[in-house]
Amino acid sequence: MTIDGLREWLDAVPFRPFVMRLSNGREVRVRHPELVARSPSGRTVIVYTAGDAFEMVDLLHVASIVRTTGKGGTRGANGRSSKG
């Protein structure tokens, strides 16, 4: 994943929450674009979660991005819902 690819998801109008699935199987939920800080190089981002907690993500490890359904699951590229 590149910063330009992520930017398309963050700048979408209307914005829809999504999940970044990482190469190690971890999932990072992005609930709002203002909760994501981009590094100057564009290689890493910090995603703020509940409270003041955050996750640092190296974009080279983003295997896929899926839109969340708002019901605790995700909707993949094929449009089918999957619990996650």
Image (cartoon, helix red, strand yellow):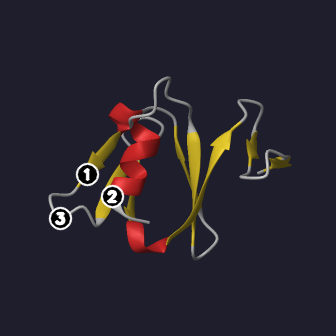
Identify the residue at image location x=42%, y=44%.
8
Is 45 rendered above or below residue 43? Answer: above
Is 68 rendered above or below residue 43? Answer: above
Q: Element under label 3?
A: loop
Q: Element under label 1?
A: strand
The answer to whether residue 26 shows anywhere in this view is yes
What residue did someone put label 2 on? 3
Give the amino acid at mark 3. Ser
Q: Residue furthest left?
A: 40
Residue 61: give x, y in percent of width and height.
Answer: 47, 73
Give the amino acid at mark 1. Arg
Whole-angstrom CA distance, mark 1 to mark 3, is 8 Å
Left or right: 56 as drawn, with respect to 42? right
CB atoms of marks 1 and 2 within 8 Å: yes
Q: Element under label 2?
A: helix
For residue 44, which quarter of the picture?
bottom left
> Of the residues under marks 1 and 2, which one precedes in the sequence?
2
